[in-house]
Amino acid sequence: MPVAASKIRRPSDGIALLAERRVTQVHLVGIAGSGMTALAQLFLDLGWKVGGSDVQQTAAVERLRGSGATIAVGHTRNNVPEGAELVVYSAAIAENNVERQEAAKRGLLQWRYSELLGRLMANHRGIGVAGTHGKSTTTAMVASVLEEAELDPLAVVGAELTQWNSSGRGGRGEWFVAECCEYQRSFLDLRPSAVAILNVEPDHFDCYANADSLIEAFGQFAARVPASGVVVARKGCPATRRAVVDASAELQTFSLAEDADWWATDLRERQGCYRFRVFYHGRYVTEIRLQVPGRHNVMNALAATALCHWAGVRPAMIREGLEEFQGIRRRLEVLGSWRGVTLVSDYAHHPTEVRATLAAARQMFGAWRIWCVFQPYQVSRTKALFDEFSESFEDANRIVVAEVFCAREGAGSESLVLAALLGEAIRRRGGEVSDVYDFGEILRLLESQFSPGDVLIAMGAGDVEKVCDAFTRRLQRHRRAG
């Protein structure tokens, strides 16, 4: 059935709708993705009608439904509502997707997720956070500080903030804070006024042929910041230094050493969380006490401080915002306990992240026995960083390597073989590894060998959190029965 010309939206109309913040209707294909759920919540906060679809149904999707979104499981042409004016799709959605085809047939405006972020940012003062590690947490920290300072920001974060119970925020202020992902060079669709580049390490081997191509992409991202803006870059990271060398914006560095523009000193640790003093160009700025554990979060907070200071936030507000920050989901998130075993969920899926997370966990839990059920994410990443992964588990007492989670890759039996090889490599380095790979077998092993006082960390970017979920469901059943 042909669509009337009056119903066809042209790109200029879509830009105007975003610029004017008029209530409209948007359909998100692949809405269960972390960035897409954040975007959906942002639109809901702004009063838009939000619909979407995905092949998976997650807790975040259920929360969006509770906020008024209409979401279908599976992809069909009928999912695209009659009143939709804009269709947004995630990087995982191909052009031959039936909903994208339906949108094209109707002449609807379509934007990739990162393109839409770029359009939103063009109408605001943008702050972006990029890096191989820490970008979700640092983005969330910046958004929390701006909220504490009553600047009412818009925000899109790649994980849910504990205090928001959401990863997106549709404020009415001038600032737009966004996590900027390097995958498929998506961050080149954005042009923020201020950015932090936290670190640059080899990753995303399915779209970057080598380290040089990755550094080049980060360099292009830094170059997109106008001369009137700022690039906050980690001091002491050679790849980051190469990436920012041609940036036209003011460069500010951060570190735990005094040779940086921003540095943290006098670090004091208590149960994994740090208190420290912040200096800028040799002058004392403030003292911060974090609720989130790990030395790596001192660095994240330092980058957030530099960005918020540039945005004009007073040191007292920066301190309060960071001290009130409660963290994000699946970053050493303590879910509860089961028969005296502490259940923890974590997203680490790169060797640097695994090492930092387990080091923080050791500080948190002291001499308690730590079980780490690690699910490698992507065969290409596991192969490329195999030796580094094998060296990353020294702070865990017992390790279980689950079958590799293959997103975007069809690995077949290789995912199981690779998990076994990684387990053996960890064992050769002195780790105590159990040779079970299926979640059902892993649960039976854990239940038979757990002791009160143990800690279970379900670690990875796939669906390994099912391990903790299984124990929390048993706990809930027991409570209901009681």
Image (cartoon, helix red, strand yellow):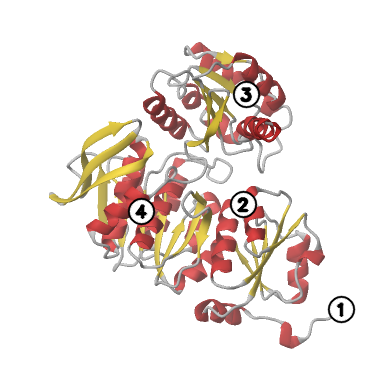
The residue under label 2 is 60
Q: Amino acid at mark 2?
A: Ala
Q: Secondary structure at mark 3?
A: helix
In this view, the residue farthest toward the front is 482
Within 10 Å of disc 2 (Cα), the crowding (few <14, some 14-19, many 20+) is many
The residue under label 4 is 196
Q: Is residue 189 above or below residue 197?
A: below
Q: Quadrant of residue 27?
A: bottom right
Q: Is residue 89 above or below residue 396?
A: below
Q: Which quadrant holds the C terminus?
A: top right
Instruction: Give the x, y percent position of residue 223.
Output: 37, 60
Q: Nearer the viewer, residue 213 or 181?
A: 181
Q: Amino acid at mark 3?
A: Ala
Q: Amino acid at mark 1?
A: Met
Q: Which mark is residue 419?
A: 3
For the image shown, how many numbered marks are present on the structure?
4
Q: Is residue 379 above or below residue 185?
A: above
**Closer to the N terminus: mark 2 or mark 4?**
2
The residue under label 1 is 1
